[in-house]
Image (cartoon, rainbow, N blue to C red):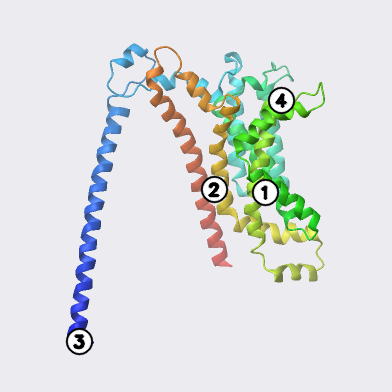
Amino acid sequence: MSLLEALTGGLKVNRFLQRRSFLQSVVSIISMLMFLFVLSKLASWGAINASFGNITSQQCAASSGACWAAATQRINVIFFGTYPTIELWRAQASLLILVAAIIGTCVPFFWQARRMLSLWLALGLAFLVLMRGGIFGLTLVPTALWGGFTLNLFIFFCVVMIGMPIAIALALMRQSRLRGIRFIAGAFIDLTRSLPLVGILFFAVLIFPLVLPRGVETDTLFRVVFAFAFFFACYEAEVLRGGFQTIDNGQLEASDALGLTYWNRTRLVVLPQVLEKSFPTTLNQFVITFKETSLVFIVGLFDVLRAAEVSISTPGWSAYYTEVYMLVASLFFVVTFSLSRYGRFLEERMASSRARS
């Protein structure tokens, strides 16, 4: 190829790149203008022309924007469901305890088995004592009256707290050298993962009480929690199994050479690496699990979606369902976005620690 042809080819490539860059710029400008247009319409509807405060539905009808009173006046129902109004302070305190437990789980100080278990048990028992009552002079409030966003957070917390140990146990069983243990763990995991979550929840609510001995009764909420936790554990066990498969055999042989027992090797060498390697997928599983707590609405629990439906069923307010569901969506967004940002922070921290080492 001559120098002239090379230069000519280079000019063609440059023109192609310039044309492509120009088209990308046009698309970017059009997309930005569309985004600004939608944002301006949303700001006009949701803020500039919106109605706020303690107003009636007739006053909202005179406004051309959103009516946030439809959501704010039912904020207690959205957060706490049908919990008795006179005992509402207990539900509010319980919600703060749940938030404290979730935040505490994210603090590195508690990243030890004993500290984490102590945190979960202490705050979990405090939540149950306040919400249910029946002791210490507190009025008994059955779980049938629990609801709203607090119920979603409680289910999420319990599913993770119960499901993670089960997931680790199932993953270890699936890595066992004994064929029978591997078969049992694999059968439980594969059977559970082949069923939809809704089907498992219906089994826990409708079928499981039928197989219990006569006179034995169990709480519907806790049946749902344990069924949900086992479903989560089976999926998380497969995530952890992928982490187990990344462990080099040389580390296992070195642990045996040092005289470590199986449990010490697993606790000190294997599990820390497995949890670190599977962390991004585990965090994604947490986000999915929190969003799936809204499915308990289907089996009759008064979660935040059921609370939103009741909020807009009041005469005069049914036209403002958009505002109520936007509030519910914002609650889910805050939790899931916080989890994703926290996960990004931990990934950067682990990457920096690996770079220093």
Split into 4 quadrants, where in the image is the N terminus?
bottom left
In the rendered structure, the answer to whether residue 193 lies left or right of residue 32 reads right
**Residue, disc 4:** 219
On screen, residue 127 above or below 268? above
Q: Image quadrant of residue 217?
A: top right
Q: Disc number at residue 190?
A: 1
Please state which of residues 290 and 257 is positioned toward the viewer in this rendering. 290
The spot of residue 324 in percent (x, y) is 43, 25
Badge 3 crowding class, 10 Å Cα cut-off, few under 14, some 14 to 19, many 20 or more, is: few
The mark nearer the N terminus, 3 or 4, is: 3
Residue 104 sits in quarter: top right
Q: Position of residue 230 (x, y in %)?
A: 68, 41
Residue neighbourhood size for the residue with mark 4, other residues' Cα within 10 Å, grouped as few (<14), some (14–19), many (≥20) = few
Question: Which element is circle 3 on?
Answer: helix
Q: Which numbered dot is residue 25?
A: none
Work out how far the residue at label 4 is from the one at label 1, CA to CA, in angstroms.
27 Å
Q: CA distance from mark 2 to mark 4?
A: 30 Å
Residue 123 visible to the viewer: no
